[in-house]
Amino acid sequence: MSEKMSEVSALEPPEKFIVAGIVSNKEFQKSRYVIQKLHICFPKLYAPPEIRPMLNVEWTAYLTKIKRKFGKGTWKLKKCVAVFLNGEFLGDDEDLLKHVSKKFRFSLSMDWYKIGNCQIFDYLQRIMLKFRQLAYITVSINNRVIGSMLFELYNDLVPLTAENFLQKCKAEIGGYAGTPIQRIMPGSWIQCGGVKLQEHQMRCENYAIPHDRRGVLCMCNKKRHKTNTTQFYITLAAAPWMDYRYVAFG
């Protein structure tokens, strides 16, 4: 970056940026790079920025939250990045570049896709540093893969439940591989795990994790402490009615 406007009042407080978005998204990575570069090059003009990388489920919940709080331009946000300046919503990556171009000339020619892949690897590594495990489920329709879901397992809070689930994910025979999605309740939950898997007795470990968002992973049961080892739910929205009924573990 090269300076376009050399004289900036020393009395002006430094600008504070916050950028939030899906970690693998190129617009998020571009915004992250720009605001970090501004702080590194001009620390008196730009305060240390806040970077909030997220995965898809977190972003959906975050977007709903900022729409309620800020309104206005947040409802027009189409890209998976949101930039804030001094506590106010600025816009997406294009709005950020327009704002910065009032003071500086710059050019960007990075491989944002590659950078995003590296960043998501680092993001997952940080999760694993908390001694939590990751599991993924790949979904196919008529033998055609349509995508995968990645879950963070709270094995530090519900170790028995998380380990039971992980072992069934790993098992080539008698596990979740090849089992159908049994029920889909639009806007509520998905039930998976198959009905023919061998069950064993396991108590409901605890109810420490709330069903407070989309993407919560929890075990099904017919009633407390029974049939708690095979079928599972994935919430599609907050489901507080599930609290203290089903054990959430991811």
Image (cartoon, rainbow, N blue to C red):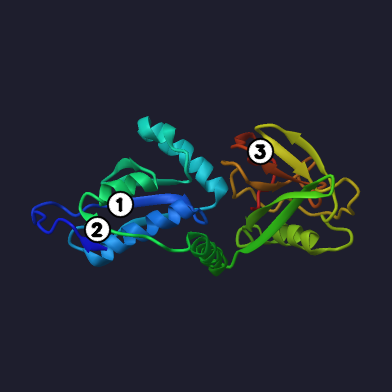
CB atoms of marks 2 and 1 within 8 Å: yes
Q: Secondary structure at mark 1?
A: strand
Q: Identity of the amino acid at label 1? A: Phe
How many C-alpha atoms fall within 10 Å of the one at disc 2: few (<14), some, or many (≥20)? some
Q: Could one spot residue 23 in this view of the protein?
A: yes
Q: How many marks?
A: 3
* Residue 77 placement (x, y as % from top left): 44, 37
Identify the residue position indicated by label 2 in the image: 47
Q: Residue at x 89, y 61 (%)?
A: 173
Identify the residue position indicated by label 3 in the image: 242
Q: Identity of the amino acid at label 2? A: Ala
Q: Nearer the viewer, residue 165 or 180?
A: 180
Identify the residue position indicated by label 1 in the image: 17
How many C-alpha atoms fall within 10 Å of the one at disc 3: few (<14), some, or many (≥20)? some
Above or below, comparing residue 117 to residue 225 in the picture: below
Q: Nearer the viewer, residue 131 or 22?
A: 22
In 3D space, how far apart are the residues under numbered discs 2 and 3 (Cα atoms)?
Answer: 43 Å
